[in-house]
Image: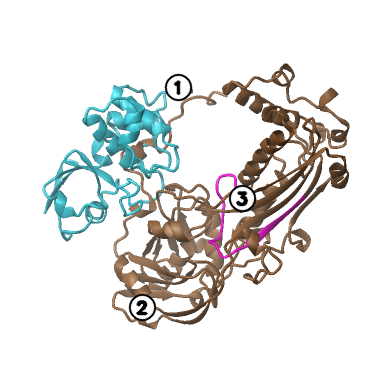
Amino acid sequence: MKVVGARIPRYDGIAHVTGRTTYVDDVRVPGTLWVKALRSPHHSASITRLDTRRAEELAGVHAVVTHADVPLNEYGHLSALGIPADEPLLAVDEVRYKGQPIALVAADTEELAAEAVAKIDIELEERPALIDVRQAFDEGAPKIHHWGNWYPHFEDEMDRRQIRKGNIAEAFERADSIVQGVYRPAAIEHAPIETQVCQVVPEPSGRLTIYTCTQALYFSMGVVAAHLQVPLNKLKLVGGTTGGGFGGKVDTATETMCSLLALKSGKPVKWRWTREEEFLCSSTRAPWHMELATAVTADGWILGLKMLTLHDAGAYARFSPYGLTKHSFHHTGAYTIPNLEFDGYVVFTNRVPTTAMRGFGVTSVSFAIETHMSRVAHVLGLDPMEIRLKNANRIGDTSPNGVVYTDPSTVATMQAIAESIGHELPAEYRTMTNERRSGELLPEHLVAQVGNPEDH
Amino acid sequence: MNLSVNGVTHEIESSLLTPLLDVLREELGITGPKAGCHQGGCGACTVLVDGEPRRSCLMPVAYADGGEITTAEGLGTPEALSPIQQAFVHHYAAQCGFCTSGMLLAGQSYIDHGGTDDAEAIQTALGGHVCRCTGYAKIVEAVAAAARGDSFDLTETAVGKYTTMTTGTTGGAA
């Protein structure tokens, strides 16, 4: 424990403060071409015509690629986990979000690449777009994804994450009150100061050297290799220096497309997204729609929770099934609720695909459950701190998916918060610990859920 | 045109209206200033022009002709860090590092103009600089420490003197 709480210098601190750290944009490779993308101008449309000849004929343009140039155009971010692919690297006959890449150009300068993109012949038939996750879940909503409007491939081909625990009907019958709430945290753009950037150099050996700002180097390596249908030993990825990511740099946003252009042109290429592209086209934290109904007693016990979660995946699945799974496991937050009926869906909309961001899946439900706990306290006229301590996770309590807590921290955390804001707690709450429930803190409705940490 | 960058004079070949940032990065290969937005919005490209902080992405190089430019590379070297660079290392004010060079130069200019360790004044001085990692508190602490003239032993750790601190790049690229 010599280093816990100690000062350890950052290994990269001195390079950072002297301007010596080499980010991807700082790599200098002579003869590098610049990349620009033709992106969908619509949230939803059919592509009725795509002809890149005028762009290819422009002097100084060295390569133009479309879906026809991609050896394996559809490969899912979670394909390695057996989750089927739904997203084309480059759009084929339809676009499902504004900013979706359709074609790419590599040219001598950034300005020339942009000029060539403008010369690509494209015709689109715009369709109505679904932007709100709740509307996309409506029975009568137009179908915007070939799988339907929500992800249908959870285990056993279920179309949702479902959790059933205890006896929810009995909990709602026994309740003194039922408290309901709807919570809708919005999308958040990661906005790293370094925008998405990639430099690819074709080597004489036939390998590609890929300088990447990715947060997930080996992950990106697998994704590039799969799209290009080449063995991993044809790729050398150079990473480890990320100018801010926060989850937004786990999607392999640029590496595969730059590799295609480098292979086709035989020259080094570089793609640096503009700030505008970063805001409009990069993935975001998901918007969520969460409906909660709790069965509560007049003295503040939470007997049961019914919850419907709609997780906005944007146009394609990416990591959302994984995010929703985490969400479902944590959906009671820091509290123990013995009777549960949870249904969660990964819903498709015509927004940019959503992705990882700092605890994704869990932060959304923390927001919902914490706001809801305060709402319950308000409805019952109870202290919001005391109701949290009463229902706090304790040793031996079980999570929604049956994990036995061995050292939950809700009690200590709430006590520290109360103290730091000068909130007087009654003695019984000030001195309580997270030890196994007994006495007044083990009412009949909680007995059946208590497990044995030793079995865990 | 001529620019003196970190004490070295360069003949400039770029056209008059080329942004100073592009001249520094692309013509001269000085990559400390970063292209975070190319719109004057983030501050990562800030350099000192004759001692004043300037958004180099918005300034045509002709406006800096004959001027003295300072970038992060010119504040101090890995072997001899300047006080504000030491303060940033000590206070962990650089996380991903991408905004750091702009923050350092804005902070240095604030101190050079007689700025004190007053947190509110420092926040005003760094007002146009965006950082997405730190939450700003550590950056403000570092500028305050440098304004006070605090001194640091950067080799001090709990496990004895740290003697193998690297000073090169962080392994990102050649």
Residue for point 61% across, 56% down: A319
Please give the range of residues in magenta: A342-360
Q: Which residue is mark 2?
A: A119
| Residue A272 locus on image (x, y percent) | 38, 59
Q: Nearer the viewer, residue A223 or A161?
A: A161
- Image quarter where the C terminus of chain A lies is top right
Residue type at the position of mark 2 = Lys
Q: Nearer the viewer, residue A443 or A374?
A: A374
Q: Which shade is chain B? A: cyan
Looking at the image, is mark 1 or mark 2 nearer the viewer? 2
Main SS type for the magenta part?
A: loop
For label 2, the SS is helix
Q: Check the image and report above or below for A129 versus B105.
A: below
Give the label on residue B160, or none: 1
Give the label on residue A184, or none: 3
Does the magenta run of residues contain A103?
Answer: no
Q: What is the CA distance from the residue labelled 1 to the residue labelled 2?
A: 63 Å
| Residue A95 locus on image (x, y percent) | 53, 72
- Image quarter where the N terminus of chain A lies is top right
Q: Which shade is chain A? A: brown
Whether pointer 1 and pointer 2 mark residues with C-beta atoms closer than 8 Å, the reply is: no
Horizontally, is A125 left or right of B73 in the view? right
Does the magenta run of residues contain A354?
Answer: yes
Residue for point 84% across, 37% down: A449
**Residue A9 shows up from this direction:** yes
User: Alpha-carbon neighbours of circle 3 within 10 Å: few (<14), some, or many (≥20)?
Assistant: some
Residue for point 64% across, 55% down: A311
Looking at the image, is mark 2 or mark 3 nearer the viewer? 3
For label 3, the SS is loop
Horizontally, is A48 left or right of B35 in the view? right
